[in-house]
């Protein structure tokens, strides 16, 4: 009768029944794999945070640009009104430009 257990041990180069003792090389390899896993998780977390930071910065720029555009529009309207008032105080009659208020034309006499 052949000893198949011995054949298996010879084939594997170790006895599968005995509990293996980790070697220094094996521990270093496992440690390296664990470190790679941790690095990959840290890299993904950093990627998520950087992506969010970039998106927020883009949103901030867009809102600021829209605000500044609206601010300039209001400032232009205020300047026109102030010019009209100052010219009136100097005695100059200036035809008013519509300011976006009531747009009905003045009544005409027939």
Image (cartoon, grey):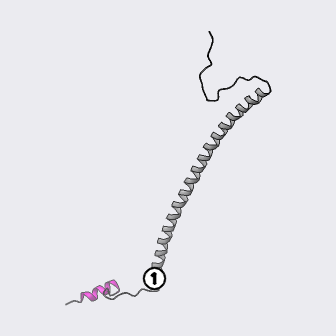
> Eyeballing the image, is 78 above or below 64?
above
In the image, taking residue 92 as reference, residue 63 lies left or right, namely left
The image quadrant of residue 70 is top right
> Eyeballing the image, is 88 above or below 22?
above
Which residue corresponds to mark 1?
27
Question: Quick one: label 1, few (<14), some, or many (20+) residues within 10 Å?
Answer: few
The image quadrant of residue 98 is top right
Q: What stretch is highlighted in magenta?
A: 1-16
Farthest residue toward the right?
90
Residue 94 spot, x, y in % from top left = 74, 23
Marks counted in the figure total 1
Residue 106 spot, x, y in % from top left = 62, 19
Q: Residue at x 19, y 90 (%)?
A: 1
> Eyeballing the image, is 55 above or below 9?
above
- Location of the C terminus by quadrant is top right
The image quadrant of residue 23 is bottom left
Q: Which residue is drawn at 48% across and 68% down?
A: 41
Q: Nearer the viewer, residue 13 or 36?
A: 36
Q: What element carries label 1?
A: helix
Q: Magenta segment: does it hold 44?
A: no
Residue 61 spot, x, y in % from top left = 61, 49
Q: Which residue is drawn at 48% across and 76% down?
A: 32
Q: Which of 17 and 68 is in front in this view?
A: 68
Residue 79 spot, x, y in % from top left = 71, 34
């Amino acid at each position: 009768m052949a000893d198949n257990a011995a054949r298996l041990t010879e084939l594997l180069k170790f006895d599968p029944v005995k509990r293996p003792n980790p070697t220094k090389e094996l521990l270093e390899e496992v440690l390296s794999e664990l470190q790679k896993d941790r690095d990959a998780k840290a890299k993904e977390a950093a990627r998520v945070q950087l992506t969010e930071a970039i998106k927020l910065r883009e949103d901030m720029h867009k809102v600021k640009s829209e605000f500044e555009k609206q601010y300039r529009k209001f400032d232009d309207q205020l300047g026109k009104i102030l010019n009209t008032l100052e010219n009136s105080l100097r005695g100059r009659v200036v035809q008013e430009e519509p300011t976006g208020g009531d747009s009905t034309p003045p009544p005409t006499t027939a």
